[in-house]
Image (spheres, rainbow, N blue to C red):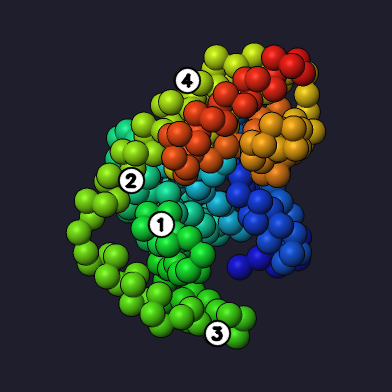
């Protein structure tokens, strides 16, 4: 889809492979800044201003890694309107679609006329806790599927047959476990965000999906990477620097709440103690 010099618009901060793959295939990576004051959702007007005659692909990710931001239905529909009849495809990464804490997920593939112009990516690692099993899927036009099948066959051969069988069982089976897991992540999110907002130098908005929180740490006076390193080495708490997700991630950290409430509370206590000693 992307030739040398073609432009791809992608969310920043965002999953780092978006930007690296754009560069890898010789494209030009065009970031759309996801801003905290918009709860890290796309500014559709800003997206529109970034589209040029060289734009070939727009990447969407909702719910979003690393911020937990969610695109509202009206914004998704506006993206489709902005694209109009231009020769632009959408790559919609919906891996966290079942881990949504309010409202209902809405895919751009549901917009009339966008089915043929959207590649939907999803998988089993988040919804069904099959992380590491390396099993996912794409939904796209048949002609694109033929090319991507050939690419996958010649690069990864295939994923293991027994994990594929497990994936089928996950899709066909009782879904209450997914609902329970989502509810548990929501309660952990609530506790962790509330705790972070009590710590000196930290402020954190409430993410609407996924299992990450993305606090603003600018008032600590530290840059993101040195602070993440210090928390790991001195407090024993693992976080990722916001800059791991692009240049607009500076001033933020990403924490995962995919851990026990006991451990999350211990992490909050350690961060709080570290800030009292070092800030």
Query: At 74% across and 55% down in the image, what residue appears?
Result: 28
Which residue was labeled with disc 4?
194
For marks 2 and 1, give the CA distance: 9 Å
**Quadrant location, the N terminus:** bottom right
Choose mark 3 or mark 4, whichever is in front.
Answer: 4
Question: Is tag 4's residue or tag 1's residue first in the polypeptide sequence?
Answer: 1
Q: Are marks 1 and 3 in contact (CB under 8 Å)?
A: no
Between residue 177 and residue 148, name the one nearer to us: 177
Which residue was labeled with disc 2?
181
Percent x, y of residue 167: 34, 70
Which residue was labeled with disc 1?
129
- Label 3 neighbour load within 10 Å: few <14, some 14-19, many 20+: few
Query: At 55% across and 51% down in the image, what residue appears?
Result: 59
Percent x, y of residue 170: 29, 65
Check disc 1 and report its element: helix, strand or loop: loop
- Label 2 neighbour load within 10 Å: few <14, some 14-19, many 20+: some
Question: Is tag 2's residue or tag 3's residue first in the polypeptide sequence?
Answer: 3
Between residue 162 and residue 5, name the one nearer to us: 162
């Amino acid at each position: 889809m992307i030739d040398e010099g073609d432009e791809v618009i992608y969310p920043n901060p965002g999953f780092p492979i978006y930007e690296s793959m754009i560069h890898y295939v010789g494209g030009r990576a065009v970031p759309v800044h996801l801003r905290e004051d918009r709860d890290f959702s796309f500014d559709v007007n800003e997206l529109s201003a970034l589209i040029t005659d060289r734009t070939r692909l727009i990447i969407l990710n909702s719910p979003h890694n690393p911020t937990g931001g969610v695109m509202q239905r009206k914004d998704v529909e506006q993206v489709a309107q902005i694209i109009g009849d231009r020769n632009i495809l959408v790559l919609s990464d919906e891996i966290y679609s079942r881990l949504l804490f309010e409202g209902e997920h809405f895919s751009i593939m549901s917009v009339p006329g966008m089915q043929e112009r959207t590649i939907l990516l999803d998988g089993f690692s988040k919804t069904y806790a099959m992380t590491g099993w390396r099993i996912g899927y794409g939904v796209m036009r048949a002609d694109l599927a033929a090319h991507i099948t050939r690419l996958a066959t010649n690069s990864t051969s295939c994923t293991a047959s027994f994990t594929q069988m497990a994936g089928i069982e996950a899709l066909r089976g009782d879904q209450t476990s997914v609902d329970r897991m989502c509810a548990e992540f929501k309660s952990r999110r609530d506790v962790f965000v509330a705790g972070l907002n009590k710590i000196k130098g930290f402020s954190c908005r409430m993410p609407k999906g996924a299992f990450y929180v993305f606090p603003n740490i600018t008032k600590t006076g530290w840059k993101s990477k040195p602070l993440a390193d210090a928390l790991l080495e001195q407090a024993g708490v693992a976080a990722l620097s916001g800059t791991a997700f692009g240049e607009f991630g500076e001033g933020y950290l990403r924490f995962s709440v995919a851990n026990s409430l006991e451990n999350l509370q211990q992490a909050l206590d350690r961060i709080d103690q570290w800030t009292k000693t070092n800030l």
